[in-house]
Amino acid sequence: MQILEFKSDKEYWAFRKQHIGASDASIIMGASKWKLSDGRTKTPYLLWEEKLGFEELKVNTAATQYGQRMEEPARQVYNEMKGEVFTPKAVKNAEFLYLMASLDGLNDSKTKCVEIKNPNEKDHELAKSGKIPPHYIPQVQMQLLVTGFDEMDYFSFHKGEGVIVTVKRDEEYIKKMIDKLRKFWDYVENLEAPPLTDDDYVKQDLQWQAYARELYLVKKEKRKLCYKEKELLQKLKSMCGHRNAYFGPYRLKRSISLGRVDYNSIPELLNVNLDDFRGEPKESWYLHKGDENGN
């Protein structure tokens, strides 16, 4: 475990964008339904866009604002209950270099950490029964992965009441999580979008469906016309021996342009990161027709 130091919040967020954070794990594992400021649910696809800088996602809901305000008071209560001092620290994993965690508290001996939540009453009651809410399991297990600790505390603070739940390291769960985190990071590194979930779509009405059907039929007819175009062109080229030809008002002329450059075949560019020379990302839309469930 490596403890990280940042000179500014800007430097911290830039570093975090280049890594998978512990709170990201809940999104990648499909355990969270966290809402963004615009009402969308944060999905692996939106997280992928955020990591690549395609979109800036803001989470500034009333719940997040309350959690931020109450984190320090909750930490003070937790420190009193534990009888030692835990301070916020950002840490990085030595084995999985693309993983990091922002710990709400790490003790001075660097042997234990805590995740602090200011939850709703339902989640707090769950903590009082000795359990943590399912949507926080990936986050705490990833903190255990990054730190290498065998256990940590989950601290639920609600209406002045603090509850400590000791969370044990779950090797079986961590193994499954590592696989999913690696796959997600492969999507980031390869600029390949992860699969979409239902939360990545906005359900519309019958009018929208009518327009979609009309567009689908237009595109289908367009494909037929493109096939017919290629078929007729091939016939004309064969008849004229692939030479310029005419009859009446119609003229067929051959035109040659330079081929595309295969940058992968240029030895001098083998170690050059071409992403540094890319232009702005281009947006594309595709219409897919499935069954009533979108399959």
Image (cartoon, helix red, strand yellow):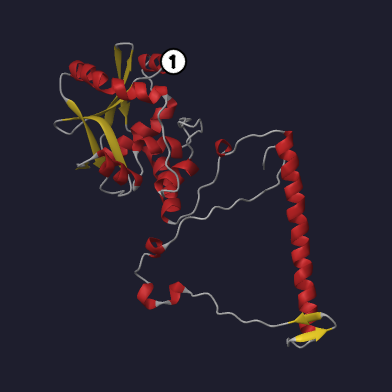
Q: Which residue is disc 1 drawn over?
A: 122
Q: Nearer the viewer, residue 122 or 265?
A: 265
Determine which quarter of the picture holds residue 164: top left
Q: Which residue is drawn at 55% across and 78% down?
A: 259
Q: Quadrant of the C terminus?
A: top right
**Placement of 118 over or under 257, stated as above or below:** above
Q: Nearer the viewer, residue 97 or 112?
A: 97
Q: Position of residue 106 (x, y in %)?
A: 21, 31
Q: Position of residue 169 (x, y in %)?
A: 32, 33
Q: Is mark 1 on a helix, strand or loop?
A: helix
Determine which quarter of the picture holds residue 104: top left
Q: Which amino acid does label 1 sit on?
A: Lys
Is 208 situated left or right of 3 in this image?
right
Is 232 situated left or right of 18 in this image?
right
Q: How many marks?
A: 1
Is 252 situated left or right of 105 in this image?
right
Q: Position of residue 275 (x, y in %)?
A: 40, 61
Q: Which residue is drawn at 36% across and 64% down?
A: 273
Q: Position of residue 72 (x, y in %)?
A: 24, 22
Determine which quarter of the picture holds residue 174: top left
Q: Quadrant of the N terminus?
A: top left
**Placement of 230 over or under 9, stated as above or below:** below
Q: Which residue is drawn at 28% across and 49% down?
A: 95
Residue 165 visible in image:
no
